[in-house]
Image (cartoon, rainbow, N blue to C red):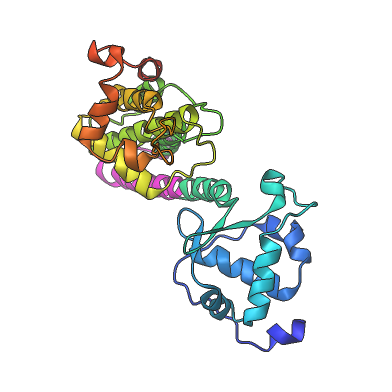
């Protein structure tokens, strides 16, 4: 079997960067035959931000430089249960077939680890550049002694580290967790921390991050209330909710009340005898401004302009 694939010229036809974790060689997939490992690594290289590999089986086989039979065999093994897998979710399966290709089931977890590594690298680079500027200002412009220069470098490093941690905390606070509806640190506490390290809350960067947090709160609330625990937080859903927040001047309560209103709607929830299925997806409830208002207006607290309990929780 090794000879079948070793004669083929392997190279990566996909541009970009893919981080391979050293733990890969300790996983059960590393015990598989060569063509399975080659297809798996190829899929890691081809995956988009959401862990989706969009290709046909012949296209994937060509990218991996394996035969069509080998590719089909690899997909069957990667999509099958694995008793010895370290990850017990999905019975150890690594991929699931979706419209247009496959989804790597553990991709979001490893993406978060990769992003954290990248943030640490960016922080180190920012500290190094800040030190260089401080050193030049102290030694050339101000003529201060080496001791003052060293103290300034330490201060700059600590300040950059605090800013990095504050931004990471704000992004982490809004991370969607549809399976249990839990969230992290209260938003106001994170905003206060940002203010303490000198990041103004009215800056465009922080507004965008803050709106992103609200988008994920709405998504998590929708997933928990309407029973979509396995729903994927993707770019399309992010864009839909974000557009509604832009339209209502970031009125988080209104979107949360829209979820409550949709839950009461027999047609949306498929309880109506004439309803063939449920229409409770993000794309339906938040498809436009009119739909948001239609569902939210059915809730008395919304009509009386009361803030939603979930919004109050994150405003503390």
Residue found 47% across the figure and 36% down from its top: 176
Q: Nearer the viewer, residue 6 or 58?
A: 58
Residue found 47% across the figure and 24% down from its top: 185
Q: Is residue 159 left or right of residue 136?
A: right
What range of the chain is rendered magenta? Answer: 122-147
172 vs 17: above or below: above
Asked which quadrant contains residue 209, the reply is top left
184 vs 62: above or below: above
**Residue 210: percent from the left, percent from the top?**
32, 32
Predominant secondary structure, magenta span = helix
**Residue 281: percent from the left, percent from the top?**
39, 40
**Residue 51: percent from the left, percent from the top?**
51, 56
**Residue 112: percent from the left, percent from the top?**
52, 46
Q: Can residue 239 be seen?
A: yes
Q: Is residue 118 left or right of residue 30?
A: left
Asked which quadrant contains residue 245, the reply is top left
State the quadrant of the N terminus: bottom right
Residue found 20% across the figure and 33% down from its top: 290
Which residue ends up furthest to the bottom in the rendered image?
Answer: 7
Residue found 39% across the figure and 28% down from its top: 266
Q: Can residue 203 be seen?
A: no
Q: Nearer the viewer, residue 54 or 271?
A: 271
Asked which quadrant contains residue 220, the reply is top left
State the quadrant of the C terminus: top left
């Amino acid at each position: 079997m090794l000879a079948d694939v070793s004669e083929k010229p392997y190279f990566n036809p996909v541009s970009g960067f893919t981080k391979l974790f050293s733990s890969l060689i300790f996983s059960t997939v590393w015990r598989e035959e060569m063509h399975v490992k080659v297809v798996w690594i190829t899929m890691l290289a081809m995956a988009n931000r959401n862990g989706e590999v969009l290709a046909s089986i012949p296209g994937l086989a060509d990218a991996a430089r394996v035969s069509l039979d080998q590719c089909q065999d690899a997909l069957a093994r990667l999509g099958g249960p694995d008793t010895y897998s370290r990850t017990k979710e999905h019975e150890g399966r690594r991929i699931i077939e979706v419209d247009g290709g496959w989804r790597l089931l553990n991709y979001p977890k490893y993406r978060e680890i990769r992003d954290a590594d990248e943030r640490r690298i960016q922080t180190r680079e920012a500290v190094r550049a800040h030190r260089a500027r401080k050193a030049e200002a102290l030694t050339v412009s101000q003529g201060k002694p080496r001791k003052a220069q060293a103290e300034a470098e330490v201060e700059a490093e600590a300040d950059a580290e605090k800013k990095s941690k504050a931004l990471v905390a704000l992004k982490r606070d809004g991370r969607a967790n549809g399976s249990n509806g839990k969230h992290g640190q209260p938003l106001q506490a994170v905003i206060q921390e940002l203010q303490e390290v000198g990041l103004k809350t009215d800056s465009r960067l922080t507004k965008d991050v803050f709106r992103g947090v609200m988008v994920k709160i709405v998504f998590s609330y929708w997933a928990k209330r309407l029973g979509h625990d396995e729903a994927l937080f993707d770019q399309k859903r992010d864009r839909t909710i974000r557009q509604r927040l832009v339209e209502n001047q970031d009125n988080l309560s209104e979107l949360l009340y829209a979820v409550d209103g949709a839950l009461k709607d027999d047609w949306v929830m498929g309880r109506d005898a004439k309803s063939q299925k449920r229409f409770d997806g993000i794309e339906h409830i938040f498809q436009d401004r009119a739909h948001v208002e239609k569902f939210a207006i059915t809730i008395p607290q919304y009509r009386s302009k009361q803030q939603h309990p979930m919004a109050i929780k994150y405003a503390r």
